[in-house]
Amino acid sequence: MRHFLEVEDLKPSEFARILNLAGDPNPPQALAGTGAALLFEKPSARTRSAAEMAVVQLGGHPVYIGAAEVGLDQRESVEDVTRTLACYNAVIGARVFAHSTLERMAEVSEVPIVNLLSDEAHPTQALADLLTIRDALGALEGLTLAYVGDANNVARSLAYAAGMSGMAVRIASPEGYTLSESVLRRMRRRGCEPVQVSNPEKAVRGADVVYTDVWTSMGQEDEADQRRQDFAGFTVNRRLMAHASAGAVFMHCLPAHRGEEVEAKVIDGPRSRVWLQATNRMHAARGLLLWLMEQAG
């Protein structure tokens, strides 16, 4: 049984296969007559819409389940919820607070588990991001990606995906918000070694893709004021974008806070590909589900 908890679960050839499947405008009805459980501990706009529509496009029935409906480890254990959902569905997607929840689900599930976001990784976003870069710039190998901001779950999955696709990765973060040494060791073992810097201009210089995320993620609201101070100077604005290559594109996983991590004239400007990214969340989810059904078959 193959699960998709992190980008590093895939070989480069498997990652490329999923991207190719995502581009199929007439996908096989691999989920016809079956359900896909979509469990959300954390709310979402794009992830829920993208996952539900991907299931529908493959002929399946998406079953949305909110946190209060199952009460993980309160009304019922994670393991028992997983076993129950596997009785009725061909796949289970989960957007959770703790990555360990997904690992517990995968240990007992008889159907594939898909990470729709955890505190450690956001691999379905990374699939959509690489699909977007390929759509915008062509072949991935040899491109340079600059990520500016908190080296969070999005940054980690993105760095893995870009690295295994032959891209150079630079990450600009203030002190205290960089990738941990343990994460870097795992990346090196898989041939991915992002360059970490503290100067956004150094990261962006000559880059083909400039990417950022919010400074304060869901669940970190009490840190917002401190983070605004710590990330001063890390806003992706037109001045910073001028250091990128002439054909560089801007990307953001959304939601965005205009005037904080990104200037409005950048995210709403001609270099922005954020709405292509949002669209590709659905296509990437469809490609992933197709691949998982191939593996299960």
Image (cartoon, helix red, strand yellow):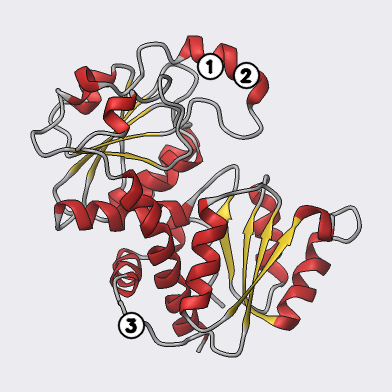
Q: Secondary structure at mark 1?
A: helix
- Point out which mark residue 227 bears: 1
Q: Categorize mark 1 by other alpha carbons within 10 Å: few (<14), some (14-19), many (20+).
A: some
Q: Given the image, on which type of amino acid does mark 3 rest?
A: Asn
Q: Which residue is mark 2?
A: 223
Q: Given the image, on which type of amino acid does mark 2 rest?
A: Glu
Which is more foreground, mark 2 or mark 3? 3
Apparent side of residue 257 relative to residue 34 in the rendered image (left or right):
left
Q: Categorize mark 3 by other alpha carbons within 10 Å: few (<14), some (14-19), many (20+).
A: few
Q: Given the image, on which type of amino acid does mark 1 rest?
A: Arg
**Is residue 55 shown above or below 252?**
below
Task: Name the residue: 59% across, 18% down.
Answer: 224
Apparent side of residue 251 relative to residue 62 in the rendered image (left or right):
left
Q: Which residue is mark 3?
A: 26
Which is more foreground, mark 1 or mark 3? 3
Task: Name the residue: 30% across, 54% down.
Answer: 130
Q: Quadrant of the N terminus?
A: bottom right
Of marks 1 and 3, which one's residue comes earlier in the chain? Answer: 3
- In this view, the residue in front, 166 or 247, is 247
